[in-house]
Amino acid sequence: MPVLAWIVLSGLLMSSLALVGSLTLLLPDRTFRALVLPLVALSAGSLIGGALFHLLPASIHDMEGIAPFVWTLVGFATLFVLEQFLHWHHCHRPMSEHRAPLGWFILVADGIHNFVGGLACAGAFLVDVRLGIVTWIVEAAHEVPQELGDFGILIHAGWSKRRALVFNLLSGLTYLAGGLVAWAVSRSLDVTFLMAFGAGNFLYIAAADLIPEIKQEARGVRAVVHFLSFATGVLMLLGLRLLLPESMHAGG
């Protein structure tokens, strides 16, 4: 299947994950908290594993000197700057804890985040389809708890279920837009740097957004469950790194 087809398919599938947000309507706050924070921990581990075991090694192989590390820093700093100006971060809390209606603000911020994610994933597909698939899986693992939180915010802000689903889905389509932009640019420009850029994105989301949320609930059995979930995410990506052919991480 052509790389463009993989990029379009991955973009549509990622956008469809917005629909999982409707599950928040079926769950009481207590159950929501019990399920979501372990998923957040799993997502954090997967993002760190994806960055360190897949995207960064591939970019180091294909780029010269300190370029991979510079672009990793750029990817990290880009999300930092966006959050500084938007005053927004990922939210995975129950609806009862959303004290201020955010509505459109959350959708715009999420759309920008999805666009950047689409750029990074498409960059991985353009290097190697298998690397693109791994990158998509990691981003999807992160997207599920995020969409649960975002949908909860919209409902709490007074949006109807249908409106929240439709606009969350439209916000998710910016992931596909980012992928198509990366593909178009690749016609005339080497986009290998997007792998390192994506690694920086992954590290920032895990370290600045997800792990702090996990630490707020770091007591007793919950702390153990969250750490094991985090470790599972890291080990899954390490396992993929050891099982998949070395050529996948060497740009070819």
Image: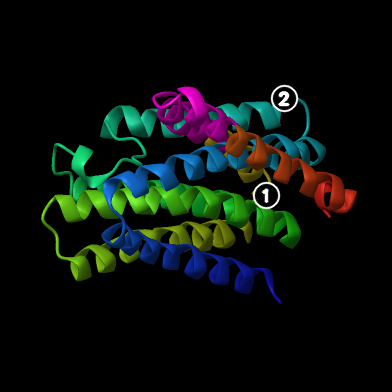
Give the magenta-colored segment's residue range: 202-227
| Residue 119 visible in the picture | no
Residue nearest the observer in this picture, 21 or 178: 21
Is 168 a magenta residue?
no
The quarter of the rendered structure image containing the C terminus is: bottom right
Secondary element under disc 1, as helix, strand or loop, is loop
Q: On the picture, is 18 further left or further right than 227?
A: left
User: Residue 22 placed where, x, y %?
Assistant: 31, 63
Nearer to the camera, 134 or 213:
213
Position of residue 243 relative to residue 177, above or below, is above
**Which tag, 2 or 1, sits closer to the chain's start?**
2
Return the residue found at the far right: 246
Q: Does residue 223 appear anywhere in the picture?
A: yes
Give how far apart the Cα atoms at labels 2 and 1 are: 17 Å
Give amino acid for label 1. Answer: Asp
* Residue 128 image point, x, y percent: 75, 57
User: At x 54% / y 43%, what residue is drawn?
Assistant: 43
Q: Which residue is mark 1?
A: 190
Q: How is the image coloured?
A: rainbow
Comparing marks 2 and 1, which lies closer to the viewer?
2
* SS under mark 2: loop
Give the residue drawn at x 56%, y 72%. Answer: 9
Q: Is residue 214 left or right of residue 87?
A: right
Q: Is residue 171 above or below residue 241?
A: below
Query: Does residue 194 appear left or right of residue 53 in this picture?
Result: left
Q: Which residue is mark 2?
A: 66
Left or right: where 82 falls relative to 236: left
Q: Amino acid at mark 2?
A: Ile
In this view, which residue lies farthest toward the front?
Answer: 221
Location of residue 237 (image quadrant): top right
> Magenta span has 219?
yes
Residue 176 position within the rendered picture, expressed as x and y whole percent measured from the top left: 47, 63
